[in-house]
Image: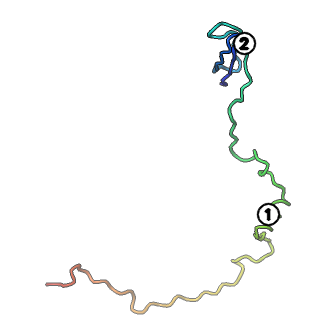
């Protein structure tokens, strides 16, 4: 529901009323019972969320291509070989001799039996 601003023509009193859009406008001042007029308010700011509200949401394909050229991105072409199509050469990992070193148990450094 919007807030309407009124001004009394007789005493100059200004006041706001929170009322429905379908309510009839106020006719009398609450102070002096003089005639009031409804003022044009600025209203509340609107917030648009999501896509489709800005000019940049609907850029042309030519604009997008030009931006890619300027930024240095190369467009992906279907005819270019992909990484999985290229031959792979694997080098085997060196085998560890003797396995991993074993850790000794005990915390003090000397062992008594």
Residue 108 placement (x, y as % from top left): 21, 80
Residue 58 placement (x, y as % from top left): 80, 51
Q: Secondary structure at mark 2?
A: loop
Q: Residue furthest left?
A: 113
Name the side, left or right, on which 62 lies relative to 18.
right
Q: Is residue 64 above or below residue 29?
A: below
Q: For the C terminus, which image quadrant?
A: bottom left
Q: Is residue 42 above or below residue 12?
A: below
Q: Which mark is residue 9?
A: 2
The label nearer to you, 1 versus 2, is 2
Name the side, left or right, on which 47 lies relative to 98.
right
Name the side, left or right, on which 31 lies relative to 66.
left
Q: Residue at x 71, y 9 (%)?
A: 35
Residue 93 placement (x, y as % from top left): 52, 88
Q: Residue at x 64, y 18 (%)?
A: 15
Q: How many numbered circles are shown?
A: 2
Depth check: 36 or 96 in front?
36
Q: Quadrant of residue 47?
A: top right
Q: Quadrant of residue 1?
A: top right
Residue 16 placement (x, y as % from top left): 64, 20
- Packing grade of label 2 (10 A; few <14, some 14-19, many >=20) is some
Q: Secondary structure at mark 1?
A: helix
Depth check: 60 or 41 in front?
41
Q: Which mark is residue 67?
A: 1
């Amino acid at each position: 529901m919007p807030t309407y601003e009124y001004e009394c023509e007789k005493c100059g009193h200004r006041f706001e009323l929170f009322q429905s859009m379908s309510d009839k406008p106020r006719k009398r001042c609450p102070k002096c019972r003089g005639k009031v007029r409804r003022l044009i308010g600025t209203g509340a700011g609107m917030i648009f969320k999501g896509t489709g509200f800005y000019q940049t949401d609907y850029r042309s394909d030519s604009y997008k291509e030009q931006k890619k050229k300027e930024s240095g991105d190369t467009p992906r072409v279907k005819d270019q070989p992909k990484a999985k199509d290229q031959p792979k050469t694997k080098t085997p990992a060196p085998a560890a001799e003797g396995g991993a070193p074993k850790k000794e148990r005990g915390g003090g450094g000397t062992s008594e039996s």
